[in-house]
Amino acid sequence: MSATAPVGPVGTSADPSAPGLVTPRPRIARPRPRALSLGLRLLGPLVLLLAWIWASASGTLSSSLLASPRQVLSAFRELWTSGQLGDALSVSLTRAGLGLAFGATAGLVLGVVTGFSRLGEELLDSSLQLLRTIPFLSLVPLFMVWFGIGETARVVLIAVATSFPMYVSAAGGVRNTDRKLVEAMRSFGMGRLALVREVVLPGALPALLSGLRLSMTLSVIALIAAEEINSTAGIGYLMSTAQEYSRTDILTVCILIYALIGLFADGAARLLERLLMPWRTQGAAR
């Protein structure tokens, strides 16, 4: 009695070599062309710009509510040639950079301590989680009382706002580090500081970069709030002056500058992620 091929559901042969059946091919993820990807990213902003131009030209959007793109471009040229925009941008970037540096460093150190040490977690985590729930904007009046209306209050406000995203990401990343690897390195006599530097931080790198990206984005939001504390320089000062004279063109320029700063910060975080973890972008499907 001859052997028969196994029969699959509804009477079809389960043998891939049987007539009428085609072996399925694995789906190969092909990278998207760079020009197409860039065009898709620019499509949304281009549509918004065209809608803005049309609404201003047709009179649907009054210049008293929002200046036209031509007026905004003229105001940008006026501020740049007079040097006001360059000076304001330098002051604002310094504030955001200092606050981010202090805040991200503090969040990283606290996150490593609470994530790596059970004693550190028991002593610090509950208090830090309580402070994290306080909106940083509610601290503005208190910081004005403590530090006055100078640069210290603004930098501290940005530092507080940016420290907690880094803290949460660092603590979570450190806790998720491979414990078997940590114990193995300890058995070889590696000290605690070397263990953190050589094993824990590299293992938590994806979480650390995610926290840095959130902190960089939040630093721009905190900068806007910080520059409302009686600023005499910076982008926020230009906005306050423009508000007094109802200059919607200058207000729009300042808003766009804030948006560009945030976009640059996010792009810098993405670039840092690609440089430090190239395998994530190489293996990702486009």
Image: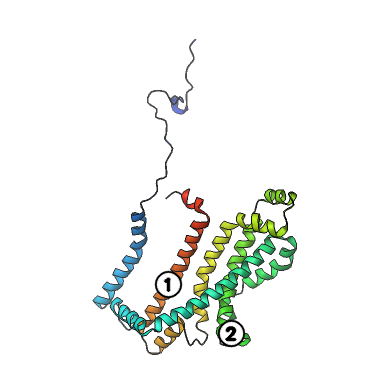
What residue is shown with label 1?
259
How far is mark 1 from mark 2, CA to CA?
26 Å
Residue 157 x, y percent position in the rendering: 57, 78
Q: Is residue 94 above or below residue 269?
A: below
Binning the other alpha carbons within 10 Å of mark 1 as few (below 14), some (14 to 19) or many (20 upward) gives: some
Q: Secondary structure at mark 1?
A: helix
Q: Which residue corresponds to the image point at 72% horizontal and 58% vertical from the top-left?
A: 192
- Viewer-nearest residue: 1 or 134: 134
Q: Can you name the residue that lies furthest to the bottom here?
A: 245
Q: Amino acid at mark 2?
A: Pro
Q: Which residue corresponds to the image point at 32% horizontal and 66% vertical from the top-left?
A: 46
Q: Is residue 81 above or below residue 159?
A: below
| Side of 60 relative to 276 (left or right) | left
Q: How many marks?
A: 2
Q: Earlier in the sequence, mark 1 or mark 2?
A: 2
Residue 33 x, y percent position in the rendering: 35, 51
Rendering quarter of residue 199: bottom right
- Residue 218 appearing in the image: yes
Residue 204 x, y percent position in the rendering: 61, 57
Q: Amino acid at mark 1?
A: Ala
Q: Secondary structure at mark 2?
A: helix
Cβ atoms at labels 1 and 2 below 8 Å apart: no
What residue is shown with label 2?
141
Q: Which residue corresponds to the image point at 47% horizontal and 49% vertical from the top-left?
A: 282
- Residue 67 appearing in the image: no
- Viewer-nearest residue: 161 or 212: 212
Q: Which residue corresponds to the image point at 35% horizontal and 62% vertical from the top-left?
A: 42
